[in-house]
Image (cartoon, rainbow, N blue to C red):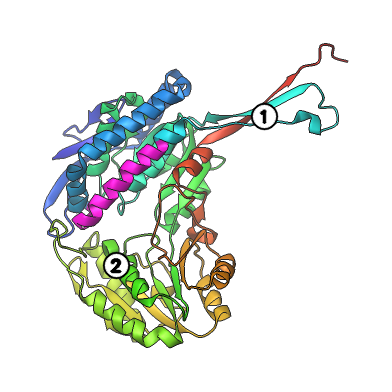
């Protein structure tokens, strides 16, 4: 299967183009071949998008945008199995989780469809200011224009739609660059939008390498906003080069989860197995640090290891598989070196640590130090550290001792302590009696510190994909 960029409805996959092969991370079978785009393709896509915005999308009524998004949701729901199998093949995500991703993607589209019809403005009480008598003031939210959306491999459908759907709901056009490792679901998604009636130039797909097309997507003077999910180094580079453009950055994390002495340990263990190892830990808000009150530590660790070792490891396309490969061999080998480095500095492997090609076994670490990579950096791998603590102030301090601050989980039956700790944690979001890895598609999602800038979640993304315009009217019959 050879696929290429789609610009104004035309696919670009000529024979002279450089190509890149996409392989199934589990068995290395070839999934697709991409005809790569260059800077000239990006410029063409942006120019076409700019024209489509001014000729069509800028004036498209809200009910039409809503209907397109709803139709896309219904089409995606009808083709759930096809998309789920594609994600399992190109990303190595177990089928059960791939199906869950499609379900969430459908929900994102429906949220966007609803919110497209509820982009409200407000009337300003102008007479609240001296001299404001007989004046009317109100605001309008207007679309930005061209949005560059750069998406990661780990949720190739849902995280893409967290950018595309709000942008379209707000009346923008999108230049969409998916991860090179997972392009097929993106290609299928763009075709779905066109089938649903979206004007062809309103969503242009760029199949290119970030190092080749990235600057053009970020720096072009017709691009009004860049929205990116990915690594901290790339995010910093985008922030530096974007200039005065709006930017939303969803970057790294090393999410803490805290179990106090009154936590429901049975439920916490079960949830944290999923929270640390779903999709091989390749989740921005994966449970990476688990702080357990010393009174529960031994019993928690014993049960946590037991349930982790009970995971079914294997082919992502097998219905029973809980745990599959990492995205490629390089990522798995990098994670293994972090484990080895920690062990050489005194850490202990409670279970896991074995590497076979792309399969890194679910790994639980103990006796870790705060300056180890597996604690201080984002592992983005199936590695979790379990750490004992004694008092609240201590665990809050350790949780905040990071350049990151995306999401955290706090487990306790004491509501006063739960809210007190939630306020003290330096995070974009805190879940009480829920794992850090849990995310709904309608709440504000984003980080503080170096975990990012801005918020996603459909309603909140729409707000940032519009400009607030003020309009004032002087109602005085005579002007002095």
**Disc on res. 214:** none
The CA span between labels 2 and 1 is 49 Å
Local packing at callout 1 (Cα closer than 10 Å; few below 14, some 14-19, many 20+) is few
Left or right: 155 as drawn, with respect to 218: left
| Residue at the disc numbered 1 | 123
Q: Position of residue 447 (x, y in %)?
A: 50, 57
Q: Is residue 109 magenta?
A: yes
Q: Position of residue 215 (x, y in %)?
A: 42, 43
Left or right: 417 as drawn, with respect to 14: right
Relative to 415, does residue 92 appear above or below in the rendering?
A: above
Instruction: Please tell me whether mark 1 sits on a helix, a strand or a loop.
Output: strand
**Disc on res. 277:** 2
Q: Measuring 45% from the left and 41% from the top, which residue is drawn there?
A: 218
Q: Which quadrant of the rendered structure holds the C terminus? A: top right
Q: Is residue 92 magenta?
A: yes
Dominant secondary structure (helix, strand or loop) of the stretch shown in magenta? helix
For residue 218, say whether it is visible: yes
330 vs 326, nearest the viewer: 326
Q: Measuring 25% from the left and 32% from the top, which residue is drawn there?
A: 191
Q: Which quadrant of the rendered structure holds the N terminus? A: top left
Residue furthest to the right in view is 480
Q: Position of residue 307 (x, y in %)?
A: 25, 76
177 vs 253, nearest the viewer: 253
* Nearest to viewer (mark 2 / mark 1): 1
Relative to 157, does residue 343 appear above or below in the rendering?
A: below
Quadrant of residue 80 within the rendered picture: top left
Q: Which span of residues is magenta-colored?
A: 91-112
Quadrant of residue 267 within the rendered picture: bottom left
Q: Measuring 60% from the left and 33% from the top, which residue is drawn there?
A: 468
Q: Measuring 49% from the left and 38% from the top, which residue is drawn there?
A: 462
Q: Position of residue 324 (x, y in %)?
A: 20, 63
Local packing at callout 2 (Cα closer than 10 Å; few below 14, some 14-19, many 20+) is many
């Amino acid at each position: 299967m050879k696929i290429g960029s789609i610009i104004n409805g035309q696919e670009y996959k000529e024979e002279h183009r450089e190509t890149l092969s996409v392989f199934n991370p589990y068995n290395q079978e070839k999934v697709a071949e991409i005809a790569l785009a260059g800077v000239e393709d990006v410029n063409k896509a942006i120019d076409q998008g700019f024209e489509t915005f001014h000729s069509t999308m800028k004036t498209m009524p809200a009910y039409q945008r809503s209907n397109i998004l709803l139709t896309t949701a219904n089409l995606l729901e009808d083709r759930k199995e096809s998309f789920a199998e594609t994600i399992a093949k190109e990303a190595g995500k177990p089928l059960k989780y791939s199906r869950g991703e499609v379900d969430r993607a459908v929900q994102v589209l429906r949220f966007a469809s609803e919110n497209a019809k509820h982009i409200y403005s407000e009337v300003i009480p102008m007479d609240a200011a001296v001299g404001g008598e007989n004046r009317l003031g109100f605001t309008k939210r207007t679309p930005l224009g061209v949005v560059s959306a750069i998406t990661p491999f780990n949720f190739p459908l849902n995280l893409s739609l967290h950018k595309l759907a709000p942008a379209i709901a707000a009346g923008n056009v999108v230049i969409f660059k998916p991860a090179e490792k997972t392009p097929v679901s993106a290609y299928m998604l763009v075709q779905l939008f066109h089938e649903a009636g979206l004007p062809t130039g309103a969503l242009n797909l760029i199949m290119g390498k970030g190092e080749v097309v990235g600057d053009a997507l970020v720096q072009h003077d017709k691009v009004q906003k860049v929205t990116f999910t990915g690594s901290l180094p790339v995010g910093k580079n985008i922030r530096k080069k974007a200039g005065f453009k709006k930017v939303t950055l969803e970057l790294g994390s090393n999410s803490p989860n805290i179990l106090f002495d009154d936590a429901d340990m049975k439920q916490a263990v079960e949830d944290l197995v999923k929270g640390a190892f779903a999709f091989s830990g390749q989740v921005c808000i994966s449970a990476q640090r688990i702080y357990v009150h010393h009174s529960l530590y031994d019993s928690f660790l014993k049960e946590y290891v037991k349930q982790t070792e009970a995971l079914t490891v294997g082919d992502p396309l097998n219905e029973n598989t809980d745990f599959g490969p990492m995205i490629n061999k390089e990522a798995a080998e990098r994670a293994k070196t972090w484990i080895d480095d920690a062990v050489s500095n005194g850490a202990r492997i409670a279970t896991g640590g074995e590497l076979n090609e792309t399969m890194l076994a679910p790994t639980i670490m103990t006796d870790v130090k705060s300056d180890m990579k597996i604690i201080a950096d984002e592992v983005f791998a199936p590695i979790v550290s379990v750490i004992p603590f004694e008092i609240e102030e201590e665990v809050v301090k350790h949780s905040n001792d990071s350049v990151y601050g995306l999401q955290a989980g706090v487990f306790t039956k004491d509501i006063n302590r739960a809210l007190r700790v939630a306020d003290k944690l330096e995070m974009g979001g805190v879940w009480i009696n829920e794992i850090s890895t849990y995310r709904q598609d309608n709440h504000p999602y984003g980080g503080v510190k170096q975990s990012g800038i801005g918020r996603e979640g459909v309603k909140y993304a729409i707000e940032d994909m519009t400009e607030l315009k003020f309009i004032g009217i002087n109602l005085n019959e005579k002007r002095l």
